[in-house]
Amino acid sequence: GLPDRLAGMVYTEVSPSRAASRFIGQPIERKEDQRLLTGHGRYVDDVTFPGTLYGAFLRSDVAKATITRIDVSGAEAMDGVVAVFTGESMNPHHGEGWHAMLGPELLTPPPLAPGVVKHVGDPIALVVATSRYIAEDACELIELDLDVQEPVTDYRIAAQDTEHLVHGDWGLESNAMVAVPFMELSEDLAATFEQAAHVVETVVEQNRYVGVPMETRGILAAYDNGTDECRIVVSNQSAHGTRNFFSRYLKIPESNITVDLRDVGGGFGQKMFVFREECAVVLAAKLLNRPVKWIEDRRENLTAAGHSRNEWAKLRMAIDSDGVIQAVTIDHKADVGAYPICPAVMDSTLVPGPYKIPRYGFSTEMVWTNTMGKNAYRGPWMFETTAREMLLDYAAREIGMDPVELRRKNILYMSDLPHTNPAGQTFTEMTAGETLDQAVELLDYPAFRAEQAAARAEGRLLGLGVSVYVEPTSMGVPSLHSEGATVRVEGSGRVTVWLSTSSHGQSIETTMAQVVADTMGVDYDDVTIVQGTTQGTPWGGGTGGSRTAVIAGGAVRAAAAEVRERLLRIAGHTMEAAPEDLEVSMGVISVKGNPSASMTVAEVAKFIYDDPSSLPSDIEPSVEATVRFQPSSFPTWSNATHLCVVEIDTGTWQAHVVRYIVSEDCGRMINPMVVEGQVYGGVVQGLGGVLLENFVYDAEGNPLTTTFMDYLLPTTTEIPAIEIGHVETDSTTNPGGYKGMGEGGAIGAHAAVANAVADALAHLGVKVTATPLGPNDIFELVRAAGALPA
C-alpha cells in the first residue's frame, strides 16, 4: 500500500477556479465495463458472414531474395482449398494504395511479394480455404525457389552501403529514405560550444519493440460483384480512414463501402493504417465474390505487424559554469525497415523539450533495411524525450550537479511562457516546472538521496531516474485536424451521439457521455455513444494522436450545446417563458427559481416528433445537431514528469522498479479514473521497452524473438503501484479546457527507467547509453566497467 499522504489522487490546480460539474471531472464507472468485463465484447473473430472462407499467408523465411519459381498446384489440389493467390495473380487488380493521413508519397506496397522478398515475414501467397486449418496446411504444399541475397540489417551504416540495396529493384542508389544534413538553427552555435565551461557528449540508442495489442490484426471482407458493394469488419483505429483507403484501392465510391470496427482489443498506433495483408483479403473477397476472413496469429503479429523505436543519436550539450544549458545538437538515425507503414520518427523540433535551450542544431537520417517496416507506436516521436532526458542525467553526473537541480535551472515554468524554442515550436500553456516540483515533493527527494547513500554503503544498487517531457496532442495532421459529432434526442428523451472515433481502451463511450450529459443537463445514464462504424457517423480520422478529448470532445460539446439551445427554445414556447430564463438539470427543463414550472426533455422530444407543425415558423422542429470542430491552434500541449526508483539485484542483475511517480497535466480531466488508467498503461509499455521487450534480428535478418517465450512482456509481478499527481491547467485551444494525454505515459517512462538504472550503477563507473537493460545487458555493462563483485 501507499503511504497515507499519497492515498487517493494528488492535485495542484493552476487554472482559475471553475464551476463545479455534475459529471465532468468525476471518476464515473465506465460504460464499457459491463460489456467488456463480462465477456460480451464483439471482436472481428466473433463475426462471420454466410459462406465465409478463411485465409492464411505463406511468408518469406529469408530477409532478401528473388523468387525464381513458385508452384501452387499442390496447394490448389488440396480438399477445401478454394483459391491460391500470388503476386502475379493478385497484384494487378488494385488501385491507388495510400492513406489519407500519410498522403500519396507513402504508398502501400503490393499486397503480395512482386517477385522479390525484402524481409522475413514478407507475404508471398494467400491461400483461401473452407477453414483456417486447411489454409495453413495448404501453405506448406507451395513449392518455392529463392535466389537468396545478402540483406541490409544495420541501420546505423545502411546509408553508406551502396553495394547492398534494399530497394535496388526500384532503381534507387541509396538506402536512405530521408537524409537531412546537419542544420544549425542558431548562428553562434559553434562558438557557443567553443566557449562553454562544459561540453558533454554521449550517444543514446533505443531498441526495437512492438505494440503487441491483446487482439491481433484481423479482417472480414465481403464483396458483392453485382452491386460493387463491399462490407468490411476490421480491427482498426479509423473506420472512415479505412473506407477512404479502400475506395481508392478498389476503385469504387466510398458510399459503396461499409466499415465496422466493433470492439478493438488494443491498437497503440499499430492499427491506425491499412496493411498489405488486409488489402490482400479484401481483393480476394472481390475476386472470389465470397466473404474472406483472416485473423493474425501471435507470431505474425510479432514479426509482420510493424515495428517501432530502433533509433540512435549522438548528442552534445554546452553548459555554462552555473549549470545553465547554452546549446544542444543531435545527429539522429532511424530504421524504417523495408516497407514502413508509417515512418514516424523523432520530431527534431521537440528535442529542446520543456527547457530554455537557446541554441540548437540537428541532422536526421531515416534508412531502409531488410527488416519489418516501421509503424506508429504510442508516442512515435518519443525518441526526442529518450535522447534528451538520458543526456541530461548523464550531463549532470559529468559536471557534478544533481540531475533535478540541473533541470530546475533550465526548465520552463508557466511564468516563462509564451516561449519559442530555436526549432520554432511555441509553448503558450505548459507546466513542466510545476510537475517536476510536484513529483519531487511526492518522492521526498532529500529522503530518497539519504536512503540511496545508505543503500550503497550496504552494497545495494538503488537508483533514481528523471524524465520530463512535453507532449504534442491533437495535432494539425491531414485527416486528423477536425472532427464531427451528431447529437440527437430520441423520442424517449434519451440522447444518442454519433462519432467517428474508435475506442481501443480509451473509454470514449464514458468520457464523451460525460461531456454530453454536463453540456445538455441530462443524466449520464441516458447518453449512448455510437462509434467505430461508417454507418451514420460523421467523417473523421478515428482515434489516434491523442486527439479524442480535444477534437472529438470539442465537437461533442458544441453539438450538445446546440441541441440544448433548441430544447430551451421549444420548451420556452411551450411553457411561455424566455429561453434564457430556463435551465436544464438531469433531464428536466424548469424556470429558474421556480422548479415547479417544468417539463422533461422527453416531453419536449415527444412534442417535436408527434406535433412539429404546432411550432411557430421561427423555431426549427429539431432536437438534433451535427457540428464539426477544429481547435483554435495546433498542437495542444500536455506535459508530465516521471520519477522511477529501481533496485538492481546483484545476484541476478535484474532491475526491479520499486517506486514510480508521475505528475501530469492533461488540462481539465473529464474522468480522473480514465486519465490514470491511460497513465498506467503507458508507463507499463515504457517500462517493458527498457527492462523486458526487445525485438532482435540476427545479422542475416532472421527474427529471433517470435514468441512470448523470448519476446517478454511486463506482468503484474514487474509493475509497482504507480503514484500519480495532477496539475490541472485548462487548455485555451478548446472551450472544454481539455488536453490530449493518451501517449504521454509511454513517452516519459523509457528515459525514466533507463536513467534509474544508470543512476544505480554510476558510482561503479558504468555508463548507460542504450536500451534494453535486461539482466544480461546490465551484467555486461558492469563487467565491462570492471565492477563485478569478487
Image: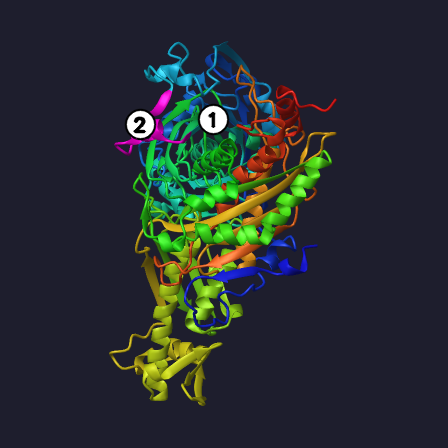
Q: Quadrant of residue 535?
A: bottom left
Q: Residue at x 32, y 26 (%)?
A: 182
Query: Which circle's residue, 1 or 2, is located before the other in the chain?
Result: 2
In the picture, the quarter occupied by the C terminus is top right
Question: Is label 1 in a helix, a strand or a loop?
Answer: strand
Residue 373 x, y percent position in the rendering: 46, 28
Label 2: how many residues lie within 10 Å, few (<14), some (14-19) or many (20+)?
A: few
Q: Residue at x 27, y 82 (%)?
A: 616
Q: Is residue 671 visible?
A: no
Residue 302 x, y percent position in the rendering: 56, 31
Q: Is residue 579 left or right of residue 695?
A: left
Q: Quadrant of residue 644?
A: top right
Label 1: how many residues lie within 10 Å, few (<14), some (14-19) or many (20+)?
A: some
What amino acid type should be assigned to the residue bearing mark 2? Ala
- In magenta, the rendered stretch is 176-198
Establish if 562 lies above or below 640: below
Are the residues flagged by discs 1 and 2 in contact, CB closer than 8 Å?
no
Residue 179: within the magenta?
yes
Quickly name the residue at label 1. Answer: 203
Residue 651 x, y percent position in the rendering: 74, 29
Q: Which mark is residue 190?
A: 2
Establish if 205 lies above or below 531: above
